[in-house]
Amino acid sequence: MTFTVAVQDSPIRFPCEPNESVLDAARRAGYEIPYACRKGVCGTCKGRVISGEVRAFMGDALAPAERAEGHVLYCNARPRSDLVILPRSIGKTDPFARKTLTARVFRLTRLADDVMHVHLRFPAGIRAKFKAGQHLNLILENGERRDFSMANPPSESDGVQLHIRHVPGGAFTTYVFEQLQRGDHLKLEIPFGDFNLRDSSKPILFVAGSTGFAPIASIIEDAARKGIARDMTLYWGARRPEGLYSELPRKWARDNPRFKYVPVLSEAEEPGFRHNLVHKAVLEDHPSLAGFQAYVCGVPVMTQAARRDFTAAGLPDDEFFADAFVTRADLAAAGP
């Protein structure tokens, strides 16, 4: 039996099979609901079920209060009846917006012992449009995909720059560090995601963990190019100083009096660095977050903790934007 999924206060309706996720059914029907890991880890596809019943694995991406309010993760919610849903956003897929390309490795630069800057160039005359903060899929030879955020601004559309962290035991990241060479080719699909700057006059809190710096760097560089005049503070966290692998934030702070940089270390205690978890450093400076927008990027445990603690400190839920970097280990732990 095929069920019907309707979007509240919208003419959008689409069919969904009993063993099909709401997310997959929406995509099959030509609609785009924001998503990232598709495994119930990152929380990007969170939304409400207004009426109807679903089978769903909740995971740690949903707080108990959210579950009580009818929130689910559409990537693993399967219908038991017709549904009325309320996603955070949904729109018609633009078939011309996304491209599949083969890019050439133009430059490889080791930014830290475990972080590689991979600069890819598209074929001559080819450009790929994306929004600052979005990510791409690298398509491996076996068909598997890996998500990486663009670190360059959209104005540099003849290629992409990626910050790839070596994950111990990770087959692809090990390949990048040990075998990938200048001139090699990688297949990719671009762009994905809705982690991008929203229009507002509110001051911005950027919170990055490790290579979560990459999409935030793209957003900050793009905002500077566009002349966006808003107060911005970047809290960038790592375990040790070498994990904060770029001097760009210090340059931004020198060039822009409305930009502030707070480097944060969770393990080492060094002069000139805050010592704390990166999202806790934000709360040290701003016990009330009622008047802010927050953009948070890092591992799921960090983004989930930030959402919980920031909203408890008064940040409106609709002013919290996150991009969770999900590893294959995270996906394996989430189960089938």
Image: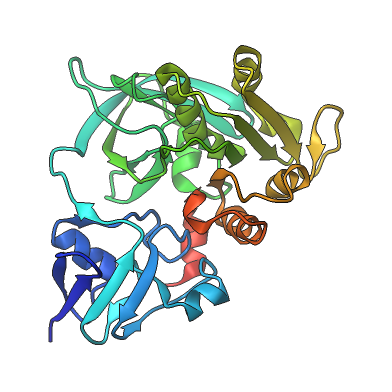
Residue 302 place in picture, x, y as percent: 62, 53
The picture quadrant where one finds residue 35 is bottom left
Residue at (70% x, 51% y) in the render: 288
Residue 195 locus on image (x, y percent): 42, 43
For residue 113, what is the image quadrant? Answer: top right
**x then y, percent, for residue 107:** 43, 18
Q: How many numbered marks, from 0 up?
A: 0
Residue 37 rendering spot, x and y as whole percentages: 40, 57
Residue shown at 50%/40% (left/top)? 174
Q: Quadrant of the N terminus?
A: bottom left
Tell me what residue is drawn at x 30 percent, y 82 percent. 51
Residue at 62% across, 15% down: 251
Image quadrant occupied by the C terminus: bottom left
**Is 291 located above or below residue 117 in the figure?**
below
Viewed as shown, does residue 118 lie left or right of 125?
Answer: right
Relative placement, left or right, of 79 versus 41 is left
Of residues 266 and 304, the one nearer the viewer is: 304
